[in-house]
Amino acid sequence: MKIDRLNANKVNIADQMTIYNEQSTEKNDKHEDSNFKAFISFPTEHEKFAKFIRKFLVNVFPDLYPFFISSAPDCIPAGQDWLKSIKDALDSAKVLFVLATSRSLSRLWINFEIGAAWAKDIPIIFLCYDDLSPITLPQPYITRQGLSLSIEESEKCLNDLVRHLIYALNITPIEELDFKFYSEELKQHLVQIQSK
């Protein structure tokens, strides 16, 4: 598959939402018996942004499902031991995505989750935005290849993320995806974060 095919704009918004919703519905009942394949670490105030990243990645790479996000009821149902659920998800994850800003990297929980993934030697992908870029990641995180998410180049950022994941995780994306739709949503999230 050629990377430039990722720029195809053939799937409309309704179809994309249907893809995500069908995957979620079909797999939600099964996730308790499955190991989480991906985990996203994020600051609480960026929960909506984290859910957007999860939605985008699962739609592009269905093989990343089930994808753990601590605030999603399909990941930690009511009555479950919250800490054990996080530990189990980290134990089974094949990749950790970190929503990285200077402020988020000062949070103990995020560093705890990064440390667990680091000890397992799984890919840790820092998605840098707001006041942080891959070249300004603190030590030792700068030793991992990070990616930028910016308002100005939102579509390019998403293309870069997909391209890097193809090689880092040896997974195949779906062939048709509307990057313009997702880049607009990415811009909206980043503008909201910058305005706070």
Image (cartoon, rainbow, N blue to C red):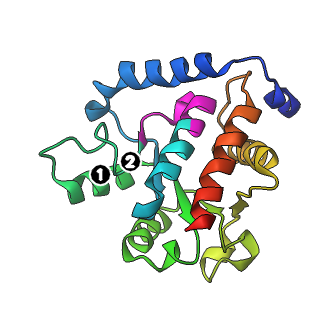
Give me the residue at 69% from left, 49% from top. 187
Magenta: predominant secondary structure element?
A: helix
Residue under pointer 2 = 92
Do the numbered discs 2 and 1 sit on residues whose CB atoms are within 8 Å?
yes
Q: Which quarter of the rendering shows the N terminus?
A: top right
Q: Is residue 19 above or below residue 40?
A: above
Give me the residue at 67% from left, 24% from top. 174
**Residue 62 part of the magenta-drawn span:** yes
Q: Is residue 40 above or below residue 51?
A: below
Amino acid type of the residue tagged 1 in the rendering: Asp
Q: Is 1 positioned to the left or the right of 101 in the image?
A: right
Name the one closer to the observer, 108 or 64: 108
Name the one closer to the observer, 148 or 184: 184
Amino acid type of the residue tagged 2 in the rendering: Ser
Query: Where residue 182 sits: x, y (%)?
Result: 67, 37
**Residue 19 part of the magenta-drawn span:** no
Query: Where residue 191 sits: x, y (%)?
Result: 65, 57
Q: Is 53 positioned to the left or the right of 7 in the image?
A: left
Can residue 3 be seen from the camera position used here? yes
- Mark 1 crowdedness (10 Å alpha carbons): few <14, some 14-19, many ≥20: few
Q: Which quarter of the rendering shows the C terminus?
A: bottom right
Name the one closer to the observer, 167 or 96: 96
Which span of residues is magenta-colored? 56-67
Query: Where residue 130 sits: x, y (%)?
Result: 65, 68
Give me the residue at 27% from left, 31% from top. 33
Give me the residue at 70% from left, 18% from top. 11
Residue under pointer 1 = 88
Q: Is residue 117 above or below residue 139?
A: above
Query: Where residue 133 sits: x, y (%)?
Result: 72, 71
